[in-house]
Image (cartoon, coloured by chain):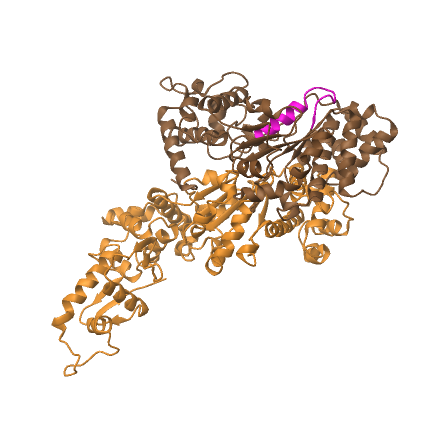
Chain colours: A orange, B brown
Amino acid sequence: MMRKDAEREVSVHPEEQASLGPAAFLALRAEEEPWLPECFVPPPEFDRMSDPRRSVIIFGDPGSGKTAVHRMLEAISLGTDGKPLRLLVHWRPALPISVAEAGLDWVKAMVGHILDACADALIHHLACYPRDYQGAPAWAQARFVWFIHRHTRGNPALRWGPLAEGDSPGASLVRQILNSPADDILYPDAHPEYVISELVNALKAIDMEGIWVLTDGLEGWAEMAFDRLCAGLKAFLSTLSLFDPSGLVYKICAPSELEPVLSHAGGLIRRRVDGIHLCWDPPTLRQLVERRLSFAFGRESFPLKELCIDSGLPVWLEKVGGASPREWLDQVTGLVEYYTTHSWNRPIDEDTWKRLRLQRPPRLYLDDERRRVIVGGRCVNLEDLPAKAYEMLRYLYQRSGAVVTKAELYFRIYRGLDRIPRPGDKEYEAPKEYTGLIDTNLWRLRQAIEPDPSAPVLLVTRRGHGVVLQARW
Amino acid sequence: MASSTPALHQTPDSSGVPEWLRWAGFRFDPFGPLDAAADPHLSEYLVGHEVFARVWGDGISWVFAPAGGGKTALRISVMQTCWIGQETNRPFPIPYVPPFLAWGHARPSEEEHLMALTRSGARALFLAMAHRPHWFFRLDVSERQDIANLFQWNLSGPLSVYLNLCRQSRQISPLREVLDPTFVMRDPPDEVTLQQWCDELESALAFQPAPPPAERWAHLLAVLKMLGFPSVYILADGFDGAPETIDNPMMIVDCMRPLLHRAEKWAQDNVFLKAFLPTETFPLLAEQFPLLLSDHVAVIHWTPDLLAEIIRRRVYVASGGNFGSLDAVASPALRDVETALARSVMPLPREMLVLTRQVIEEHVRREGAEGLLTGEDVEAAILQYTQGNLLLTRTAR
């Protein structure tokens, strides 16, 4: 064993010292991981998500990697020299004032926002790559100038002034565009579909493949104004002409709560837009963790068994992480930190891993409204749990991290008292009268929520004191 | 026709399907575009349907089919039949898809309809005339002025913008890209003739203010009559393309109402409404406009044989005529692939295309981008298709 470890130390890549190490596991939020493209593992159906001809709406649960997919759609839109292959436009719909307002009028307003976002993306592109404009045919140049002037909301000179004064390679070109008269290419009342066609045509003249409109970050609105967001997006996805102009496609990442409503939108039923539920299988998730490990430590490959020798780790990850990349990575984070600081890059042994599991249990969230608990990437339905056991869980959840005695659980939950009686009090009962009852319900709770009920990490006994629910979210 | 679809080697698609299609000998992906209006090759593989005979001819006509049932393909087929030949002795087709997004509502007035119809007609005439400049060359000065004004008033932008696009690119295809990618007219003029047309058309322009919508519509009809078209077909389609109408046949009827009130009068002037509508609108229209629906009503039904023929025809065209069935690229144990698929699918052309593409995707997923299609590919595709339709969205596997 010693010899094997020594060999492994020798095999460590020389660049390991300069690599990210545990920092690659710190944020676990795609928007805070600029290096994501270097360790991205595509989910199943990524080829459909990235089909350049098809609009798509990607539904996913929290932590399922929607933002990572969104960022990778951006990444694959860059050529090897980093130059965009297509115009990337970031758009987030505004909410309609009410569900009843979510019709054509609102969609028309949203198209105005999208065209403004296209103007934004276009002028930034030209500011970075002025030669694209300078090498374009005159008709395409005229269209760029017209589009920026006509479809920028507000005053283009004020809006893009900072860009014209900045130090981008195309600052002088931006000034030139802003100072140029914008000849009418289309009349102001031209149909938006024709406006888009003109822009796409001009982009093709500078060797860009068209436009991708990317949408992400709808979770907040889904929580605050679910009905209005659903109604608005459903109207948008039912306006079929939006999906007709060739060269412009939408790539929308949306929380899975919207799926039951949006999958009935006309554009999906008529197959103008593909609906894909983002879902991961265990082999791909394992690959994702191992890729992240190899990136973090600058190695060619980094199998899980080199992080922890316990063969139960993959099973644990599958059980705790479910189908969520974030939860798989989260479960590895503690191991990675220990591996770097204490293990001197030797695989972690079984006992240490069990201890680390206790120190960093899976994240737990009690969804009281739906009577379910989310443990890591698993959703556990508690409908069948006896009422008192569920009440105990809720009580413990409200006091997460604090030790709660069995007496407290009994007298508070079963007897409904607001204090724990002492010997001699009228309501007092000896522990032997209720310990069995509480233990049975704790056993039920562990069976329901623990990834491994025989070795609890969430509902932990403090011998001689009581139990503690280690909720982390 | 110049294709706006990227050739297979240009398609940045990571699914492996383009590679397999290329391996199998296809020049382009004939199963990719699911919407007839977005398929630049549609004219090459339109399958004859008996309903065509009921639509064609001077008279109001109605075609009913569910979404994905081939209404748009039939509408485009009628349009392309109008464009056969070099002369103006066939009906002039106005493809009319209501511009809901520009309106911002789904209850248009008669004036809004007329404005949109005039613009569609002007676009169609502009593209047709770019292909047949001799229609213009034989006109006198005032007739030329009428035509130039028609374009100046009713195209989406100034006439000079389109003419410059044509002049600078020296071809018609960029015009088609921005005006109507489904427009097909054979034998375009040579570059010199095209340039001459652009120059003479521009010089005919005498800037006059645009008249009100009703007059502009009348002006379009007068110009078409002057050019010698015996009749005009208004090919109305896409009325279910708005959130307000997509699941609401009553709203579709309401949206069409101003046109329906005009239809009989138009017919007396040889302007014939031909509507391509969702099946659900039929009983409502029959109840509210019984006289209009007394004749020339057709419902598109697809049999497994016809659906199979759709795929065979596409295979034939995309393979450059080398083979006419997927059997040619399937293992010997697999026979009559198209019929097997047609019997497993909802009887709609779009669904047939979806399932066929699914077979190829299954094959690529299991075997890679080469090799003959197998019975397992077909079975897996049918299973996935059935589950996908139950779920409505695809779940990543």
**Camera-nearest residue between B345 and A341:** B345
Q: Is residue B271 magenta?
A: no
- Answer yes or no: is residue A27 visible: yes
Viewer-proximal residue among A188 and B79: B79
Q: Is residue B79 magenta?
A: yes
Residue placed farthest to the right in the image? B141
Q: Determine which quarter of the picture holds residue B216.
A: top right
Q: Magenta segment range?
A: B73-92
Q: Give the residue displayed 23% in from the left and 65% down from the top.
A: A388
Coordinates of residue A67 in the picture (x, y in percent): 47, 51
Left or right of B25, for residue B95: right
Q: Quadrant where the C terminus of chain A lies? A: bottom left
Q: Name the one closer to the observer, A315 or A114.
A: A114
Q: Exactly how many numbered labels are in the figure? A: 0
Q: In this image, A223 relative to B167: left or right?
A: left
Residue at 46% across / 45% down in the picture? Answer: A263
